[in-house]
Image (cartoon, rainbow, N blue to C red):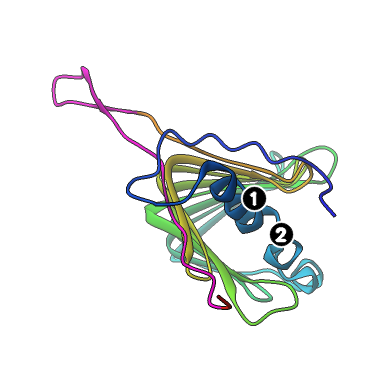
Amino acid sequence: MLKSIMKITINKVLNLNINYKKLILLLWAFFVSPVAMPEKADRNKPIEIESDMMTVDDNRSISIYTGDVILTQGTMVIKADKLTVREDKQGFQHSTSVGSPTTFKQKRDGVNSYIEGKASRIEYDGHMDKVHLYDKASVKRGDDTVFGDYIIYDANAEIAQAMSGKTQGSTGENSKKTRTRAIISPNKGN
């Protein structure tokens, strides 16, 4: 059954005729459902990175790839303008990809569909097993999509959050607050 309670911050969902409890249940299923998990076999596959330029600094345990970067590991594909990968002292991998946008795509475990995401910046924390998507972020699973200025997914705690922020005008003043948004398709079985 349910292993944990999912905490979701949603300011308002536009023009959806869905009650609040159903929306929370659908978003919980979107982010936490076991069938939404990435392909488990990908972790054991080699990582291949293509780019126009690569810089490796063994003393600092950091690698920087720039120019049309494509990282592939099994079914996972990350595309970016720049990808920085570092290894911490415990041996965990951390990465930051930036682009206009940077994207990821990975096959879901046990089903023939993909999880896809895009943002201006995507950070992965291998130690905490968290993915952070910043600025014009979206995550799509099947026909359902969540949008926000910042989306975080914590695989260990099974918590997903989509948050909105304020935009700045040309003179630097805070202007209209952006909003999170979810598009949830009807269940095809009904």
* Horizontal and vertical percent position of residue 55: 55, 53
* Horizontal and vertical percent position of residue 63: 61, 51
* Horizontal and vertical percent position of residue 95: 61, 48
Question: Could you say which quadrant of the image residue 73 lies in?
Answer: bottom right
The residue under the point 53% across, 42% down is 20
Crowding around mark 1 (Cα neighbors within 10 Å: few <14, some 14 to 19, many 20+) is some
The residue under the point 84% across, 47% down is 3
Q: Earlier in the sequence, mark 1 or mark 2?
A: 1
Q: Which residue is mark 2?
A: 33
For the N terminus, the quadrant is bottom right
- Amino acid, disc 1: Trp
Is residue 168 rendered magenta in the image?
yes
Q: Magenta residues, as a range?
A: 166-188
The residue under the point 83% across, 46% down is 91
User: Position of 70 compared to 1: left or right?
Assistant: left
Depth order, front residue of 14/133:
14
User: Position of 127 compared to 30: left or right?
Assistant: right
